[in-house]
Image (spheres, rainbow, N blue to C red):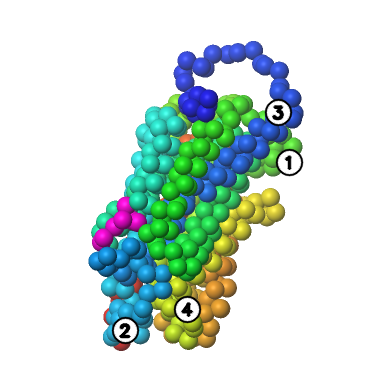
Amino acid sequence: MGGCAGSRRRLLDSEEEETAPEPRPPRSDHKGALWKNVMGFWLLGLCNNFSYVVMLSAAHDILSHQRASGNQSHVDPDPPPTAHNSSSRFDCNSVSTAAVLLADILPTLIIKLLAPLGLHLLPYSPRVLVSGICAAGSFILVAFSHSVGTSLCGVVLASISSGVGEVTFLSLTAFYPRAVISWWSSGTGGAGLMGALSYLGLTQSGLSPQHTLLSMLGIPALMLASYFFLLTSPEPQDPGGEEEAETSARQPLIDSETPESKPDSSSNLSLQERWTVFKGLLWYIVPLVLVYFAEYFINQGLFELLFFRNTSLNHAQQYRWYQMLYQAGVFVSRSSLRCCRIRFTWVLALLQCLNLAFLLVDVWFSFLPSIYLIFLIILYEGLLGGAAYVNTFHNIALETSDQHREFAMAAACISDTLGISLSGLLALPLHDFLCHLS
């Protein structure tokens, strides 16, 4: 039954015939379907980003430790101090954690660059299956890895899963009430918090990272179940109420002389139409690129260098706490759309860049006296990033026509990935420069 629902999500040319309007379903049925859909998209957001977040949380461990002969874990939960770079005032790995970031994001970038050109030709259901299989493969490969290289291959699988899933599910929101966008965003924020917190908590409690990763294999299965069995078949949308009023008050990103109709397959758009839509999206794409560039430059370029020796937490534990607090901030702000809506997202980009500059100065001069001040700044960083993400896609959904929305959502999701990729490329040489300072 769920497979049939999934197959109907791809609009077919043979179904374009005019049909007589059907009577509206009872309101109770409509509300029940709405709750199934919003919960479905929340779970899809949670599951889609989970493996990506776990790999970033494990980045310091992946690069710091090789599996010892006969050891059942990839790393020890509380590893003894090791001399990584004794000539530097920073406790550096030989390779920056940005290397894991690049393995976790570059495949996603390639997928998102190519997706608007041809991924829409593939039905939604096979895409979701590919995403789920890759997520499961990433956990298994990293769990049983004997080398950093093999672990990075597992990270690449997590990236493919996340990239295919994000393009697919954001495009799919065009065929559901716009409320599902905020629920999807909240789910992705929940993935950050739960992924980072689960890795931190399970390893801190003594469970081996190998068993921690294997215990997460239920997440890809939950994603497949949410898509095939929880989501209902798309219906023609009639937003109404507050959402309709807000939409009518907005200036559309793309001027269109044709009346809006129900969302149609993006494969019907010409290349010229796609380019016109993309140019209209730049008002939101550029700020989101800047936000994600700044925050991931902090996360994978500076987190490892923000090391406090006057605390009971060792270096690996500090890194895991940084990741968890960042994801907590992201979760709160990605779930805040009904409370706070921000149209001018460039303000968030400016604040995040100032955050990067402040922490970069602290890395250089080490003037902050306590790790708890860093904890607060990282929480604030996550709040800015999550707010930029959810408000960007909410604004795009309101300001694009129905016929353009599926393509616009798929095209705009390149923003965060592009910013993250650029930050990883610049964080690598910065890491090498700072770690060679005596």
From the top left corner, tell me how far across and down residue 365 is, in percent.
Answer: 44, 85
Write the residue at 40% across / 32% down.
126
Nearer the N terminus, badge 1 or badge 2?
2
- Give the CA distance from mark 1 to mark 3: 21 Å
Please name which of the two marks, 1 or 3, marks the residue nearer to the observer: 3
Q: Looking at the picture, which amino acid does disc 3 mark? A: Asp
User: Is there any visible trace of residue 279 in the rendered image?
Assistant: no
Decide: is 171 above or below 329: above
Task: Determine the secondary structure under disc 4.
Answer: loop
Q: Which mark is residue 88?
A: 2
Please name which of the two marks, 1 or 4, marks the residue nearer to the observer: 4
From the top left corner, tell me how far across and down residue 244 is, in percent.
Answer: 70, 37
Residue bearing the label numbered 4: 313
Q: Which mark is residue 56?
A: none
Task: Determine the secondary structure under disc 3.
Answer: helix
Please name which of the two marks, 1 or 2, marks the residue nearer to the observer: 2
Dot 1, how many residues are within 10 Å of its Cα: few (below 14), some (14-19), or many (20+)?
few
Depth order, front residue of 357/89: 89
Q: Looking at the picture, which amino acid does disc 2 mark? A: Ser
Residue 144 within the magenta-colored segment of the rendering: yes
Magenta residues, start to end:
141-147
Residue 45 within the magenta-colored segment of the rendering: no
Residue bearing the label numbered 1: 242
Nearer the N terminus, badge 2 or badge 4?
2
Depth order, front residue of 16/261: 16
Residue bearing the label numbered 3: 29
Write the residue at 35% across / 51% down.
140
